[in-house]
Image: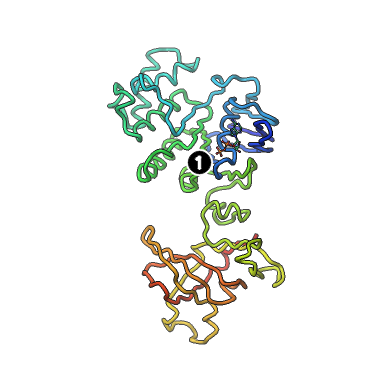
Amino acid sequence: MSGLVIRDLSVRYGETVALRGVDLEVASGEIVAVIGPSGCGKSSLLRAIAGLEPLASGSVTLGGRDLAEVATHERDLGLMFQDHALFPHLSVADNVAFGLRMHKKNQDKAERTARVAELLQLVGLEKLGGRGIDALSGGEAQRVALARALAPRPGLLMLDEPLGSLDQLLRQQLVVELRSMFTELGVTALHVTHDQGEAFALADRVVVLRDGEVQQVGRPADLWRRPASVFVARFLGHPNVWDRASSELASVESVSSGPTDRQSVLVPVSAISARPASDGSSSGLGHDDDRAVVVERTEFREGRFRVIARSTSSTLCGLAVGPVRVAFEVVDEPRIGDRLRVKVDQRQVVVF
Ligand code: ADP
């Protein structure tokens, strides 16, 4: 069965255009994440799919069915939100059962009970069925919300910042669990988040939204390696993005089309390798100093040091640039003020 197909979708709130001409497909069994800054239209997209906002233009079809005339509760959707939206007066099991009762296809009580047990097992809460919602941790409550959303086997599961309220460790753990669970069950999912890391960890493909318009769609690795614009590169978290329009880097020039053609440039952190300026392994000639940088600060992250350094010359990484700050990673901690030489893997450089 085909998944979700959105064509030319626009949503307006009076004068505000929240979504403009959005085209998006989620294949059956695929996990797609939508990312973008606050206010870019993520929630409006989910609300429009759910039938909670009228469409100013366009269409939404799920499983080949046009949803235009279909009521929200008959759209075959599962929803999971940051605030769980669980019923505090019902037990864990009854919250999951509620998701089933809402659907006409699950009216047999014995089947419902069996399905609830199956779901609680799936999310690792089989022992907590009788417990009240108030007596759960944030992570457990999120699992109940997931079980409730999945119970009716929805044609599309929509997740709106589902892990936003959890601490970092729990988020990372749940993302991994969600991914393997969705893959195993063949769930078709649309996941909305402002967190690029969460999107990359969970999704098969990622959509970047800005001001209600799709900027780029692609697999995480493709987006990371080939962002389509300065905006996308920065939003994904690349630190070395030099915008031709910015005054700081007004002198970024060259690369492929000649010295007068000013362009925006991305040098991924992974493209830069550094070594001490004095380690003697270079030719020893002065011109290598062109690529010298001076360490301004360091940050320890995931076993390596992220170095922020200032380039001392007018060329860096084979590009003609003004004095810029550049970020890269090394294993051994340099001192502030150290001079390092950097080398760039030109294949990873992106020019916009
Ligand atoms: P996101 O979920 O990415 O933060 P939203 O979809 O909530 O973005 O909002 C998109 C745009 O629509 C924003 O400019 C927001 O201010 C506006 N907006 C959202 N909901 C309403 C509403 N009910 N009335 C008026 N404007 C709204």
- Residue at image point 70% right, 71% down: 258
Report how many numbered discs are placed on residues in the image: 1
Q: In this picture, is 112 found above or below 326?
A: above
Q: Which residue bears the numbered disc 1? A: 193
Of 86 and 157, nearer the camera is 86
Quadrant showing the C terminus: bottom right
Ligand 1 is found in the corner quadrant, namely top right
Quadrant showing the N terminus: top right
Report helix, strand or loop for mark 1.
strand
Of 148 and 4, nearer the camera is 148
Q: Position of residue 333 (x, y in %)?
A: 37, 69
Spot the residue most to the bottom.
Answer: 285
- Residue at image point 42% right, 41% down: 175
| Disc 1 within 8 angstroms of ligand 1 (CB) | no
Find residue 149 and report its image quarter.
top left
User: Seen in the image, is 243 located left or right of residue 135?
Assistant: right
Of 104 and 310, nearer the camera is 310
User: Seen in the image, is 146 located left or right of residue 226?
Assistant: left
User: Seen in the image, is 154 located left or right of residue 251?
Assistant: left
Q: Position of residue 302 (x, y in %)?
A: 38, 57
Spot the residue most to the left.
Answer: 127
Pointer 1 local density, CA inside 10 Å: few below 14, some 14–19, many at least 20: many
- Residue at image point 40% right, 17% down: 112
User: Seen in the image, is 303 located left or right of residue 200?
Assistant: left
Amino acid marked by disc 1: Thr
Q: Position of residue 263 (x, y in %)?
A: 67, 64
